[in-house]
Image (cartoon, grey):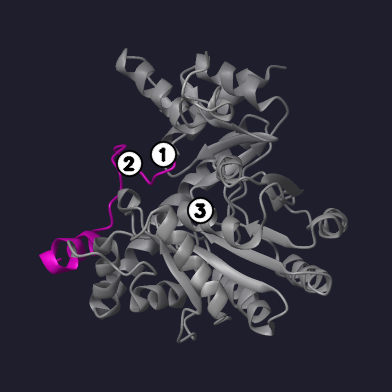
Amino acid sequence: MPGPLIPSRHGLPADDPIFALHAEAMALAATGRPVLDATVGSLLDESGQLVVLDSIMDLWRQLTAQEVAPYSAIAGDPAYLRGLVQRAWPDLTHPGCACATPGGGGALALSLRMFLEPGQVLLSADPWWAAYPTIAAEGGVQLAGLPWPAAGAPLDVRAWHTAAEALMARQGRLLFWLNDPCHNPTGRSLAAGDRAALGTLLTDLARRGPVTLLLDLAYPDYARDPAEVASALAAYGRLGAEGAVLVGAAHSLSKAFTLYGARAGALAFPWTRDRDLQAALVTAARGLWSNCARAPQSVVLRLLRDGKAQAHLAAEHRHWSEVLEARALALDAALRAEGLAGAPWQGGFFVTLPLGDPAGVGARMRGDGVFAVPVRGGLRVGICGLRAVDAPRFAAALRRALGD
């Protein structure tokens, strides 16, 4: 007799692969072995402790009971939504169609219910954040990859166009998840010319059916060059304002505010006020998680009213961006010293080292006590947790794992 679990829920992994690797690293370290753990997806300081931004925690400690305990509106506080949108597009005065979500992951999951029917195909750049396939599968859709450009290479516009055009012909609509600028897991962003070409491609496709571009904005606060980030977001803003392509963003407080455990974010489409879309967002949110937590929204509201706190937050983001850049440069130099390709970085918590057989290479490195995350076509290295001083050991372990 079959058990109560439906057949499709059997045989699933017991843990997220990245968290499982991290647990393996911690277990090995507990035996006394020296371990380098580059699987972590949270920002760590030089002593291995979680970085928590002082500017944000100062505001958190000021919260009153009434800023924490009551239900929030299902859509979220309007000023909170506007504030998150304005962090990316300062000139906007309205969040458009928007809804509070439990983190960026919640925003991504909510988008699937808005723009794809069950069984349809979602497009994203490959490699992608390891959670994308899980979110897609749980949303009842398939995930197809479009090639992210190699370091120094242009976007393969022809490949993107061919795949997207064929998919539009099959399903009559497209949803793109794009983690740009500061792509996870490569740590690189599209060039301005590639971004313009992508906009032209999407606009052309929108003549044949609805096209939605959702920017997964997890890491722009941790960029080598903030001006490049501003330029990229402005370009996407212009595309959204044109109206042919529905442009939106998955916002998250996890990395930007180091409020990982607060699970707060938003899904916002600032250039539309479509009543049906807003109603659909709220209805789906009600059916999935109902109201989001009020406390992190209250922190954002306090931040919006406090110019000193905003300046403090900006200074902290700049400091940790410089730390990440130093770590990326140290890893790049260490890899080159071992005769390997470097690791160019423009922003975010990770770099990806292209190589064949990433699972096998990763397993051999773990024999040396060095942990990284195998992804499609390479190894994801969390420079958010890998200190600059440890880069030579990491590079040497990779060289041994690759063999001669």
Relative to 187, does residue 217 appear above or below in the rendering?
below
Asked whether the residues under the numbered discs 1 and 2 touch, taking CB atoms below 8 Å apart as contact, a structural biologist would say: yes
Q: Position of residue 292 (x, y in %)?
A: 33, 60
Relative to 222, does residue 47 appear above or below in the rendering?
above
Give the left or right position of residue 240, taking residue 121 as reference: left
Query: Separation of disc 1 and disc 2 at Cα?
Result: 6 Å
Q: Residue furthest front?
A: 1
Q: Which residue is rendered at x = 31% and y = 14% of the image?
A: 32
Kind of residue sitting beneath label 1: Arg
Give the image quarter of residue 58.
bottom left
Q: Which residue is rendered at x = 32% and y = 12% of the image?
A: 31
Q: What is the number of callouts on the image? A: 3
Residue 46, which numbered label? 2
Kind of residue sitting beneath label 3: Gly
Q: Is residue 56 in view from this perspective? A: yes
Mark 1 or mark 3: whose residue is earlier in sequence: 3
Q: Position of residue 344 (x, y in %)?
A: 62, 49
Please provide the residue range marked out in magenta: 41-67
Asked whether the residues under the numbered discs 3 and 2 touch, taking CB atoms below 8 Å apart as contact, a structural biologist would say: no
Mark 1 or mark 2: whose residue is earlier in sequence: 2
Residue 348, which numbered label? 3
Q: Which residue is rendered at x = 41% and y = 78% of the image?
A: 82
* Mark 3 element type: loop
**Quadrant of the image for the C terminus?**
top right
Q: Position of residue 160 (x, y in %)?
A: 81, 56
| Nearest the eye: 287 or 354 | 287
Q: Position of residue 275 (x, y in %)?
A: 54, 80
Q: Which label sits in the foreground, 1 or 3?
A: 3
The residue to which callout 1 is attached is 387
* Mark 1 element type: loop
